[in-house]
Image (cartoon, rainbow, N blue to C red):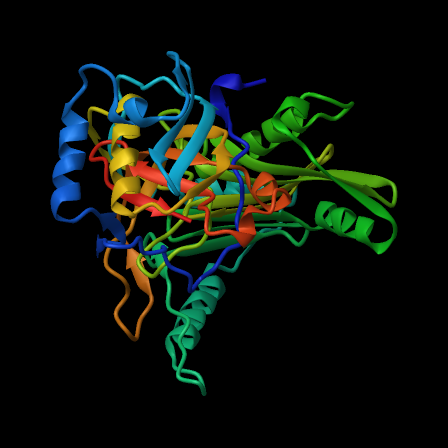
Amino acid sequence: MRKNRLCLTMAAVLCASVFGGCQKAPGATEGNDIVHAQGDIERQVQIATTDTQGQTQAGSRADEQEQTADWYQGSIGTGDNKININAAIPAVPDNLCIITLGPNDGLNRDALLEFLDSESDSIKDTSQELLNEIEENDRYNSTPQENEDRCLYSKFGDHSAARLGDGAKEASFTYHTGAYYINHELKEKCVRIFSGNFSETLITQDKMDEGSFPANKAVEILLDKAEAAGVSELSIRKVYYKEGNGYSFYEMEFVPVYDGIAVDIGTDAYALGQVWPNGFASVSEEGVAEVTLIDFCGKAVDKEPVTLLSFEQILKILEQYLDNGMIESQGKITYDRVELNYYPVPNSAPAPDEIEYKPELLLTPIWHIYIPLDEYVDEGYAETSEPAHICVDAVTGELVKTD
């Protein structure tokens, strides 16, 4: 098992929404879709980021607080606006960077042939057809419909496309940042299980090594396949085991990893100008049936070393956001996950009549405090105004996202 290549995080997955944007926090301004504090709160946050002496403000006002080097349990805020945290706290790396990603020129024809892994002497190149399909799709989505709506969105990468197939398999690279592969025979076997009685089981992290064909083995098979697309690490968000009609396979959702940190904020909802790198795969014991990598394969072209705020400093900052009303929470949720993740920073939205191609994608570290989606739904929190995710820039202390 290539444990050094695999970062497992069972983060929650929310429904994707092309038109949904970030929720605006009360009393906030937005620049590049990142929420910024105003006036006094901005100054208070700056103080919090530089003050590392003594007890945190959050600690002085918490109901009950216990913090060790790798665990925090306590309540931040007062009255009707507070949050509860009871979670393991990751160690802060010494060498984390703000990363600039660009298109990956390693996604060339040789890599595509390796990704296809054909056993046939007859391989058809349909790259031009794929490029035509993409251009036609962009034209259609940027053209006003009868109700004047347009389906505008952002893509990370360039205007490139390459596709090869041999009748049994097909593989493609798009924008020098995305990839797709399908084995038609294996995919048909996966689909066939739904024709009769079948079962579906969510695999939790503690069950990843169980069974005659464990989920971790399926992840290893996926990584072996994805290497040809320049992927050496990934972080699992969700895994389902599906079985029926004499066949079984794993269905996976995952995100890329850079320098050991997952690009993940627990949601796929985004506004124009944003992209969320993500991937999906169907893997059986026979191999990969299908894999889709969206904005996933970008190559690091620049790294700027940064000093991260400690979690103790983040607690101070959260206190200020709660006092100011930029975070609204009645304290009904106990957040049991805290992670260091990379956040794909949005830039300006597309022009009113065109699709945006982003030549670069900036990743900045964030402190990500959340509750998994299944817990959020099962406990009835979806009916409240409590956010499932709170993301704070780990360098500046800015409130990146609450939803």
Vertical order, 365 against 270 (above or below): above
Q: Quadrant of residue 277?
A: top left
14 relative to 19 in the view: left or right: right
Residue 78 x, y percent position in the rendering: 34, 36
Residue 140 x, y percent position in the rendering: 43, 76
Write the residue at 39% across / 34% down: 368
Query: Is any part of residue 105 visible from this angle?
Result: no
Vertical order, 102 against 91 (above or below): below
Residue placed farthest to the front in the image? 79
Q: Nearer the viewer, residue 398 or 294?
A: 398
279 relative to 390 in the view: left or right: right
Q: Nearer the viewer, residue 246 or 349?
A: 349
Residue 200 x, y percent position in the rendering: 76, 42
Vertical order, 123 against 1 (above or below): below
- Across the whole image, how many numbered discs are drawn on residues? 0
Residue placed farthest to the top in the image? 69
Query: Is any part of residue 350 visible from this angle?
Result: yes
> For the N terminus, which image quadrant?
top right
Write the residue at 49% across / 33% down: 334
Residue 300 x, y percent position in the rendering: 29, 35
Q: Quadrant of residue 167?
A: bottom right
Q: Nearer the viewer, residue 277 or 221?
A: 277
Q: Nearer the viewer, residue 169 or 346?
A: 346
Write the residue at 41% across / 44% down: 329
203 relative to 308 in the view: left or right: right
259 relative to 323 in the view: left or right: right
